[in-house]
Image: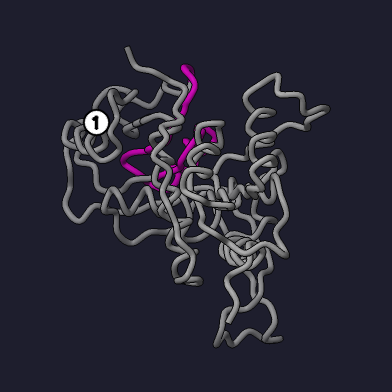
Amino acid sequence: MGKTKIQEVVNALERFAPLPLQEGFDNAGLQVGLTETQEVSGALLCLDVTEAVVDEAVALKCNLIVSHHPLIFHALKRISGENDVQRAVCKAIKNDITVVSMHTNMDNAPGGVNYKIAEKMELEGLTPFGPQKSAQRPASPGSTTADGESETVVGASGIVGMFKEPMSAQSFIKMLKSTFDVDCVMANQPLRRPIVKVAVCGGAGAFLLDDAIRAGADAFVTGEMHYHDYFGHDQEIQIAVIGHYQSEQYTNEVFRDIIESNFPDVKCFLSQANTNPIVYL
């Protein structure tokens, strides 16, 4: 039996989080390289692709990088090495490394980014909330779909879960700082009632605040919100903003689980590069 091809890994990732689940502004999927003929020598899993991450892949002899954030988000009119993105693209091509990104499709997918965040928080009884998208994907082995060839997957922008035991606002914030290695949490006035039901959206989730309130959440955890979004919600819901990078840092574990469950022969490495551009002083 031959070794796993890069295309097979890409297919497994896209079956878990079909590309049609991504938002219209996004550029998920193949970023750099060839997939059909190359065998996987190793997969480096990360949040962002930088020159340092490509160097890490080279050092680990990985010819596949799977990232959450797309390396190429905006169209490139030239590749001359004049910025970080261009230099990372050049280095990936030079070293015959394929780069694939699973972004908002993985945010929206069942079992994706938000579910990993909830797992780290030990939330239970997870249910989706917010805008939904649906997509077709190849049927799972043993599936009983009508045509036996495809099935519908429905994704949502956020999820809601419950704590097993109520938690005070102070304990809640302390837990977030410890679990996500956060130097500070941006929050509104501490809630004076216990927190049980929590809404989650990794990354920039300000657009889901009203949906979280309608879902009856006691708290809303996300990575980014604007100044004016905090107004008018004191004692209505506990807002807890932990940082974009911090909220999505465990996404590489989702990639690892997908790849290792489908291809035990593929060596997966979680990137050790901290690509967070924000420094807390």
Q: How is the image coloured?
A: one colour
Picture coordinates of residue 132, whole percent (x, y): 60, 54
Taking the image as shown, residue 191 lies to the left or right of residue 90, namely: left
Taking the image as shown, residue 279 lies to the left or right of residue 2, namely: left
Q: Residues within 10 Å of mark 1 (few under 14, many from 20)?
A: some
Which residue is pictured at 62% across the width and 78% down the height?
Answer: 139
Q: Is residue 154 visible?
A: no
Q: Is residue 3 visible?
A: yes
Q: What residue does disc 1 label?
A: 191
Which residue is pictured at 41% across the width and 44% down the height?
Answer: 200
Which residue is pictured at 29% across the width and 54% down the height?
Answer: 123
Which residue is pictured at 64% across the width and 56% down the height?
Answer: 133
Q: Secondary structure at mark 1?
A: loop
Q: Nearer the viewer, residue 163 or 66?
A: 66
Q: Nearer the viewer, residue 37 or 203?
A: 37
Taking the image as shown, residue 126 lies to the left or right of residue 10, namely: left
Q: Residue furthest right?
A: 77
Task: Tell me: residue 174, above or below residue 81.
Answer: below
Picture coordinates of residue 57, whole percent (x, y): 51, 44
Q: Which residues are magenta?
A: 200-228
Q: Nearer the viewer, residue 238 or 138?
A: 138
**Quadrant where the N terminus is found in the figure:** bottom right
Give the amino acid type for the residue marked by disc 1 in the picture: Leu
Picture coordinates of residue 170, whole percent (x, y): 17, 31
